[in-house]
Image (tube, rainbow, N blue to C red):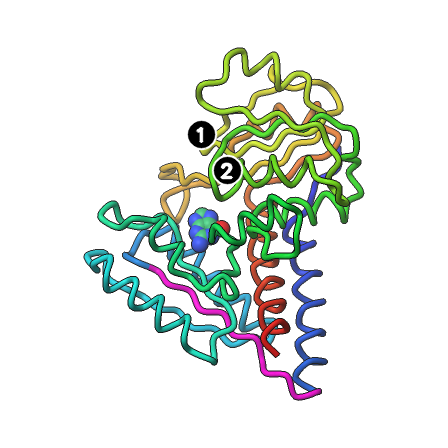
């Protein structure tokens, strides 16, 4: 079993990005600047956004965190987005999800200028992604492709089973893996909560992407020997024995599934850090596009 080490791989990518930033600034191109909007004070979202901002600083980017109250109106949030769209200093920005229930997520994502949409969530960019045209790929699927590529996990002609159909991971992942690209050319099955006989399908998979958000859902009896497993889940589970009061669990029962796996991502330290590295890659690209 080979561990797909997202922590080490993302550190390598961030180093590569930092070197490129130095080269660009040396020839007079402005430092990439990422902004993030965080609405409310959800602990997990705050952790993720802080990690994104910290990673930017480390690679020599500028970063801005816009913290807005939970009760903000949809209109006021749309105005904040308009400001970032117009601000020439900002190369790319993200709106951290989920948003409070009174805000229409789709309306918000559609307000982001597609040229600054480094999350790749705007319909224009989703359309380009689906057509395999150059665009910002959503950071988590992009990170998974990069991890598969760098570890030379064979995907061509393989059966990839994606569990989960979210707009952020499952849906784009299924599209990308089927495309003609490195870490692509796969035969893809996308499954979800209405799928019948899921276990029969996952047992046929060469590669499984678990992105449904149910801790330790994928168990050893659901996979064949030699499978490669990408665990996108990251759920906080109350655990009094831990200092911070919780432990992190993926969507995969790592202990049992890893024994049958060729390649597997750990949680934490797998897909999560890759997401941040690829967001930075997109921001660097946005800055280059604008220069
Ligand atoms: N919430 C969970 N994943 C993501 C992501 O990739 N981007 C944003 N903006 N919010 C998220």
How far from the left and from the top, in percent, is residue 35? 44, 69
Quadrant of the image containing the C terminus: bottom right
Q: Position of residue 237 (x, y in %)?
A: 39, 37
Q: Secondary structure at mark 1?
A: loop
Hey, which quadrant is residue 202 in on the image?
top right
Q: Give above or below for 209 relative to 60.
A: above
Disc 1 CB within 8 Å of nearest ligand 1 atom: no
Q: 251 above or below 128? A: above
Q: Is residue 126 left or right of residue 177?
A: left
Q: Residue 119 in the image: x percent, y percent?
A: 51, 56
Counting labels gives 2
Per the rendered image, the range of residues in magenta is: 27-38
The image quadrant that residue 110 belongs to is bottom left
Residue under label 1, please give it: 214
Residue 247 in the image, given as x and y percentages of width and height: 44, 40
Residue 22 vs residue 127, the one in the foreground: 127
Q: Do labels 2 and 1 touch, CB within 8 Å? A: yes
The span from disc 2 to disc 1 (Cα, nearest Å) is: 7 Å
Task: Give the class, few, some or many, for how many residues have Cα within 10 Å of label 1's Cα (few <14, many ≥20).
Answer: some
| Residue under the image location 66 percent in, 60 percent down | 11
- Horizontally, residue 156 falls left or right of residue 63, namely right
What residue does disc 2 label? 233
Label 2: state its secondary structure: loop
Between 26 and 175, the one lying in front of the other is 175
136 within the magenta span: no
Q: Residue at x 71, y 61 (%)?
A: 12
Q: Earlier in the sequence, mark 2 or mark 1?
A: 1
């Amino acid at each position: 079993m080979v561990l797909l080490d997202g922590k080490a791989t993302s550190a390598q990518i961030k180093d590569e990005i930092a070197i490129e930033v130095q080269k660009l600034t040396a020839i007079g191109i402005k430092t990439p600047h990422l902004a993030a909007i965080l609405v409310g004070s959800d602990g997990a979202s705050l952790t993720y956004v802080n990690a994104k901002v910290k990673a930017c600083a480390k690679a020599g980017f500028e970063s801005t965190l816009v913290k807005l109250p939970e009760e903000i109106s949809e209109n006021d949030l749309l105005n904040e987005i308009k400001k970032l769209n117009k601000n020439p200093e900002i190369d790319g920005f993200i709106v951290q999800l989920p948003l409070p229930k009174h805000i229409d997520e789709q309306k918000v994502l559609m307000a982001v200028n597609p040229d600054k949409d480094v999350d790749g969530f705007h319909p224009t960019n989703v359309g380009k992604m689906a057509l395999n045209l150059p665009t910002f790929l959503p950071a988590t699927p992009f990170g998974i492709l990069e991890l598969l590529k760098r570890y030379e996990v064979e995907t061509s002609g393989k059966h990839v089973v994606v569990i989960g159909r979210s707009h952020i991971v499952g849906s784009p992942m299924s599209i990308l893996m089927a495309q003609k690209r490195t870490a692509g050319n796969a035969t893809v099955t996308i499954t979800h909560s209405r799928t019948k006989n899921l276990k029969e399908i996952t047992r046929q998979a060469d590669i499984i992407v678990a992105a449904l958000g149910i801790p330790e859902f994928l168990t050893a009896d659901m996979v064949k020997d030699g499978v490669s497993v990408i665990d996108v889940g990251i759920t906080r589970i109350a655990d009094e024995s831990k200092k911070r009061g919780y432990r992190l669990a993926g969507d995969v029962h790592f202990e049992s599934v890893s024994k049958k796996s060729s390649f597997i991502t750990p949680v934490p330290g797998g897909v999560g850090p890759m997401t941040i590295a690829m967001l930075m890659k997109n921001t660097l690209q946005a800055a280059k596009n604008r220069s």
